Image (tube, rainbow, N blue to C red):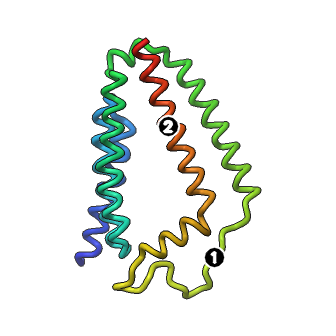
Amino acid sequence: MNGELLAFALGSGLAVAFAVAMLFQKSPVKSVLSLVLTFFGLAILSVLLAAPFIAVLQVIVYAGAILVLFLFVIMLLNLTEEAEEKETRSVHRFLSLVGLVALGGMLLGLTLRAPAPPVPPSGTPVIPAAGGDEVPLLGRLLFTDYLLAFEVLSVLLLLAAVGALLLSKRRFE
């Protein structure tokens, strides 16, 4: 077993194992900690794909800043197992199902209406050659070919921030 295969096994094993662990944790704090290790596994895979900039962003932005924000919101809302048991689970399951169906419908509608993204001709490298700088390529792709996805993600993050603010206001009233 060579080093590259070992690193791939470690990165993918970390990512998959802790993603599954995150889903089955009862405590939200433990779920966030599992998500941190999932992001580290994905950063290892990014390094293997010759994208060190993406790996560094993965660790600094996601494992650092965003997960600290998640922990802050969890602590602010006081999401503990006792508080969770007081809520009615049937209403949450119904609303989750409605949201999932609505999201699936929107994604299906967007996929059917949007034109197919341009596919590079066979043999064209998607990443720059070794030693090349992938940051300008990433910026160009984000603001040209994937602008719609970038803007949708921006709106989604804005809605998540507004939702967290509304949840915290309702909790203190």
Query: Is 13 rendered above or below residue 120?
Result: above
What amino acid is at disc 1? Val
Residue 6 relative to residue 102: left or right: left
Query: Is 165 rendered above or below residue 53?
Result: above
Reading the chain from its start, which is encountered first: label 2 or label 1? Answer: 1
Say which quarter of the image contains residue 80.
top left
Rendered residue at 29%/33% (across/down): 29
Rendered residue at 59%/24% (across/down): 94
* Residue holding disc 2: 160
Give the image location of residue 24, x and y in percent. Answer: 37, 36
- Count residues near mark 2 (Cα–Cα under 10 Å), then give few for <14, some for 14-19, many for 20+: few
Query: Is 69 rendered above or below residue 138?
Result: above
Q: Tell me, for residue 119, which label it has, or none.
A: 1
Q: Tell me, for residue 161, which label it has, or none.
A: none
Provide the secondary structure element on which disc 2 rests: helix
Residue 100 relative to residue 138: left or right: right
Name the mark nearer the viewer: 2 or 1.
2
> Circles 2 and 1: CB distance less than 8 Å?
no
